[in-house]
Amino acid sequence: MMWKTTMKTVRRQSSANQLFNARNLSLGATLGQQTHLELLDTSPPRTDERWQQARPYGELPGPNGFRMLSYFLPGGKLHNTNLIQMNRRLREMYGDIYRLPGLMGKADVVFTYNPEDFELTYRNEGVWPIRIGLESFSYYRKVKRPDVFGGIGGLVSEQGKAWADIRNKVNPVLMKVQNVRQNLPQLDQIAKEFIDKLESQRDPETHLLQADFHDQLKNWAFESISFVALNTRMGLLSDQPDPNAALLAGHMSDFFNYSFQYDVQPSIWPYYKTRGFKRFLKTYDDITEITTNYIEEAIQRFEIDDGRKTKCVLEQLLALNKQVAVVMVMDMLMAGIDTTSSAFVTILYHLARNPDKQEQLRRELLRILPDAKASLTDETTKNMPYLRACIKEGLRITSITPGNFRITTKDLVLSGYQVPRGTGVLMGVLELSNSDEYFAQSADFMPERWLKSDMAADVKACPEARTRNPFVYLPFGFGPRTCIGKRIAELEIETLMVRLLRSYHISWLPDTALQYESTIILSPCGDIRFKLEPVERVGESL
């Protein structure tokens, strides 16, 4: 079975008579994988008046390939920038719509900051939206290890009918509220253990942690998603974690770094397998071996205890198809550590910098959990409007990605320019979420903008402070390709936020704002230090 990388030159019969290159990464014919080009609309090119009056694609502002590369070299305008900074600087240079040339065989990408373009792109994406995933996933799973994955690439990398078949199978398992919330008791127990771990690391005099908070948070995120995905406790919050779990956590961290290098940045790996890329494949192998061993152990437990009325997520996935279960478990583990921990740090940072909002949230938490040692239940966590507003507001200011991506399946006119089918479109939602045009006082952390009604005389809902455009705030994406782990991530974040802020008054210690670096997401970095002062010590005892 051969991995075939070919370059196609496709002539578009538009008014611009554009020539564009599309990298056709396809697997051997025995796999029958649909390429991106095969999923595009096959209707004749547009000739309507709106299309004819639009400016040609070739007139879109933006750098050529050589200039683009120069921007990232030492001394260049984009050298050592993260995704937020890169988007902002390019927008300042080229305006609200511009084109970045495809490098190393990748397709061009049009960046737009116009919500009308967002809506037009989404409304024309069809039932099988195309979103470029991690190409290394498909290569590893379909070419290197078909013995394990059975030709299934997963939701991240599949397109077309292959993607839809998986998504339709797993949606009832992972998007159904009851299925996800059945994990609340164990996730609450994990959150309690995390608080106990923090307390053991906290200096009672200075209230500072004697450990790296972000690293500890990643252990919590891994412990939580491992239970949801594998129905297994890893022991990462104990003094004696499962050795394989610790190895797997390290491999997951390596995966994020490698994936940014080989899936996001321009790379020659589709043409030549470098030594670094082979190390990446070895990381994939290690993750696969450890994960499949955990799955086999879980299957044995399920066979012994087959009388339970409710089936966990893994059991339900195995009932669908074992290969689908393996793929989805690995995807949940890969996607559920850095993303959830990064989002949590961001939200906690804003609450720490806004003590008045934190105190208002704590009043809500004291109401739902008057006894700090009591367990959280579906009933007690049903009504938490201010907590959920705080989470939304934190993700508005800094979501884990700066925008949402699609490949256009039809010829579109975006901001007055012809954009042919097959073009990448990056919709810069994060920039607009931080604009006063769409969110009044956008620089302020204002959870009240998300409230539906007043909570108290001093806590009034102000929905007028947020945009009515549904396409501006989309932290989990939109449409059929909405993040499959949305409900799991929200439950994990809510549960730990209740426990942490019910136990501690949180303060931000560094003099500088929270910084971010780019992997395949925006991840907090640098000096991340919080002061954790027990609630009772700041006059908030019951």
Image: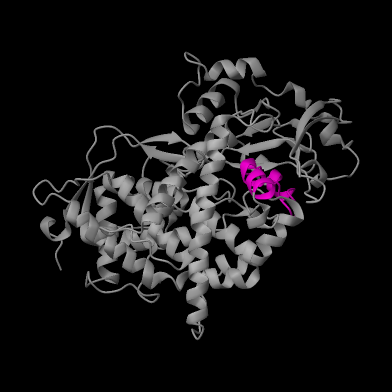
Question: Left or right: where does residue 410 sit relative to residue 506?
Answer: right
Tell me the quarter of the picture where residue 154 sits. Answer: bottom right
The mark tally for this picture is 0
Height in image: 351 above or below 54? below
Nearest to the observer: residue 432 or residue 316? 316
Q: Residues in magenta?
A: 120-144
Height in image: 6 above or below 79? below
Indicate yes or no whether the magenta region holds residue 139: yes
Question: Left or right: where does residue 487 sit relative to residue 12?
Answer: left
The location of residue 249, given as percent across then percent down, is 41, 50
The location of residue 199, given as percent across then percent down, is 19, 56
Q: Image quadrant for the C terminus?
A: bottom left
Indicate yes or no whether the magenta region holds residue 385: no
The location of residue 71, given as percent across then percent down, is 54, 18
Query: Can residue 205 be seen here?
Result: yes
Q: Residue at x 80, y 41 (%)?
A: 37
Tell me the quarter of the picture where residue 168 sits. Answer: bottom right
Residue lying farthest left?
Answer: 205
Nearest to the observer: residue 494 or residue 10? 10
Q: Residue at x 82, y 35 (%)?
A: 50
The location of residue 274, given as percent across then percent down, is 59, 29
Task: Please say which color scheme the image uses.
Answer: one colour
Question: Left or right: where does residue 214 sit relative to residue 329?
Answer: left
Height in image: 21 above or below 456? above
Nearest to the observer: residue 8 or residue 487? 8
Query: Can residue 229 be seen here?
Result: no
Q: Image quadrant for the N terminus?
A: top right
